[in-house]
Amino acid sequence: MDDYEHARPIADLIEKKRVTDADVLRLRRDVYGDGVVNREEARDIFALDHLVADKPESWREFFVEAIADYLVEQEAPRGYISSANAEWLIKAISHDGVVDYRTELELLIKAMERATSVPPFLAGFALEQIAIAVVEGKGALTRGRTLTPGKIGEDEVNLLRRILYAAGGDGNVAITRNEAEVLFRINDNTSEADNHLSWTELFTKAVAYSVMAASGYEVPSREEALRREEWLGDTSVNLGRFFSKMFAGSLGAHLDAIRLETGSEAYHGRRNAEQAGKRSSAEKIDVSEAKWLVDRIGRDGVLHENERELLEFLKRESPHIHPALQPLLEKVA
């Protein structure tokens, strides 16, 4: 990004090798003076971020905001991150597939959160950054903080949750197979560690809903399905009762919970009727889904805690499971 002539004052700041809060304020006024962030400005902002190490905290906020604006609001299609723009972003923030700086990782996630929809490969790339940090001890999350490779903490779980939520925009409800694969990789490499308890919850629900939605079952939204248990204590507008009912019962109870809280009996009655045939078959774990799980659960010869939790969840939620999974289910009987 430094192989062309930079606009001023970017060139001056690169030569000075230092950015102050006053510089950030001036850049903000210059860039947003016409209300848009264009491609040349985005390239200059990236170049300054790469070439100047001495920058204030205000730079991080400006950098993330400006580049996210460019990707989501200025580049067509507006509101979406296109495949071309996703490739541009990955190339700009990573080296050999690894994002090295936390500011650029935050940009990646923030842009995904602001977009209506993102390409699946961008979500996979973002998840992979957490896996690289946890499994290999490399990348942005290892800079300036203590991270023990082979162990997943609450911060890492929260980042995974943010990425999965962001990837669920524009109707992309179900966790994809590729996303589930990354979660399995993390789980395989942290199975014996003293992980944060929230990891078990996120892994179990994400993988289970991925499998059960593979045939078209209308699972809860990502935000609802992967919401942290602390929300059960929130009694405002009866959220506690709503989510308690959703999590305590089967997936079908999700619709009952909505009907209970909204009073929209007729609407959801029609919706249930329309989905009844589809749901009865989609709830099943079919042969391809069963094979995928068999290939991954216990592949090191040991059935670990989170894998047991996943199987228990599937036993409760999916009464029609392919026989290929039966030997595994018998181990958690």
Image (cartoon, grey):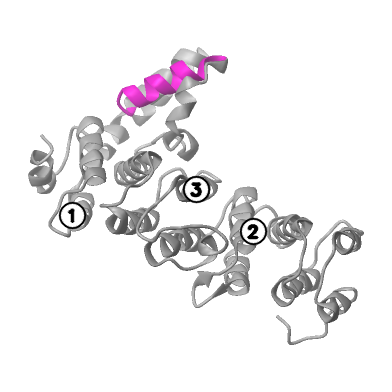
Residue furthest bottom in the image: 3
* Closer to the camera in the image, 294 or 279: 294
| Quadrant (top left, top right, bottom left, bottom right) of the N terminus | bottom right
* Closer to the camera in the image, 135 or 323: 135
Residue 271: quarter of image: top left
The residue tagged 1 is: 291
Above or below: residue 103 compared with residue 283: below
Left or right, residue 222 beside residue 87: left
**Residues packed near mark 2 inside 10 Å, few (<14), some (14 to 19) or many (20 plus):** many
Residue that appears at 44% across and 16% down:
241
**Residues packed near mark 3 inside 10 Å, few (<14), some (14 to 19) or many (20 plus):** few
The residue tagged 2 is: 107
Q: Position of residue 68 (x, y in %)?
A: 70, 57
Instruction: State which region is magenta.
Output: 237-251
In space, the residues marked 1 and 2 are separated at their CA atoms by: 37 Å
Residue that appears at 91% across and 62% down:
26
In the rendered structure, which amino acid carries the disc numbered 1? Lys
The residue tagged 3 is: 155
Considering only order in the chain, which callout, 2 or 1, is on the residue closer to the N terminus? 2
